[in-house]
Amino acid sequence: MQVEAEPGIDHGVPQRGTRRILRDETILVLALSLGASGVSALISFIGSVTKPGGLKDQAATLNASAAPGRPWLDLAWQLFGIATALVPVAMVAHLLIREGRSLRTLGFDRTRPAFDLSRGAAVAAVIGSTGIAFYLAARGLGFNLTVVPEALPSVWWKYPVLILSAVQNAVLEEVIVVGYLLRRLSQLGWTPGTALVAGAVLRGSYHLYQGIGGFLGNLVMGVVFVWLYRRWGRVGPLVVAHSLLDIGAFVGYALLAGKVDWLPTA
């Protein structure tokens, strides 16, 4: 099978035993991270569509208090959740080191900060504006739940935690769903087109808890991000873009909820 060149990919065909190891490794990484999130989101979506009332009358809360009324314990749980969510990224880094590579192979390093920041900011500006419009339209048509990006108490650590949560989401998703997954699927002989579809569907699947709109919007975002990764050879700009998008959503909601008419609240 002829496979087009992609960034961060070794194109030698692995031996049969090695291919089986890579396949099992990929399944395990996804099962411990975003693959499991996809299954969880599907179950949540089934619960939402079978519940009386429309989707837009239900809410999906992203950053909620873990210990209401106990701010220091709440902070400990928030930081614990952020740190443990990044363990699969550390696992991917370990697996890459075992094959003589590193996260630099995926373009996740500090070698080109200006490139990553400028490209990432540009992508965030384009996707952010269209994403808000798409969400409002999908919710208005009854295809989406009301997304509540944050429901944290008004304490001193609220905004730092929201920013950390946004960066954690970005690192986890872009390193695993774009950089790592595309590398492994190419090594397993998947065509670029099939790998693109798989990555985009995976990204959409773990946003399904938001509704059909969340699935479709993130599926399109997945296609765009894979295309940009193949063009630039780096996940760095994608991590920046995703971080800015989530920071805008989390912090923006915290500042604007209840103060503007166009922003739906639960």
Image: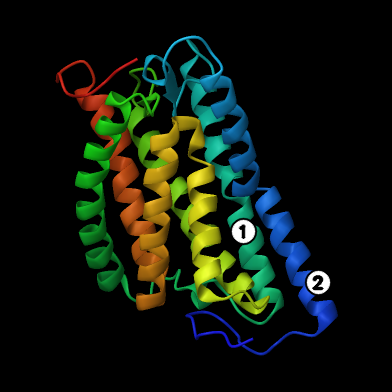
Residue located at (33% from left, 25% from top): 156
On residue 90, which mark appears?
1
Question: Marks 1 and 2, Cα distance to the nearest angstrom?
Answer: 22 Å
Q: How many marks?
A: 2
Q: Residue at x 58, y 75 (%)?
A: 102
Select label 1 or label 2 by which is in front. 2
Q: In the rendered view, tell whether residue 222 sits above or below residue 48.
A: below
Q: Secondary structure at mark 1?
A: helix
Instruction: Point out residue 208 in the picture as x, y percentages from the top left corner.
Output: 50, 36
Residue 186: where, in percent of width, then height? 60, 76
Q: Residue at x 41, y 44 (%)?
A: 216
Residue at image mark 2: 20
Residue in the foreground of this view, choosing between 239 and 19:
19
Question: Furthest residue to the left?
Answer: 260
Task: Please identify the quarter of the rendering in which residue 115 is found.
Answer: bottom left
Note whether 244 is above or below 22 in the view shown.
Answer: above
**Crowdedness near tag 1: few (<14), some (14–19) or many (≥20) residues, C-alpha within 10 Å:** some
Tell which of 149 and 255 is nearer to you.
149
Above or below 139: residue 182? below
Q: Which amino acid type is shown beneath numbered disc 2?
A: Arg
Pick whichever, 80 or 46, lies toward us: 46
- Three-letter residue code for mark 1: Ala
Q: Quadrant of the N terminus?
A: bottom right
Asked whether residue 179 appears in the rendered view, the answer is: no
Q: Is residue 15 left or right of residue 112?
A: right
Q: Secondary structure at mark 2?
A: helix
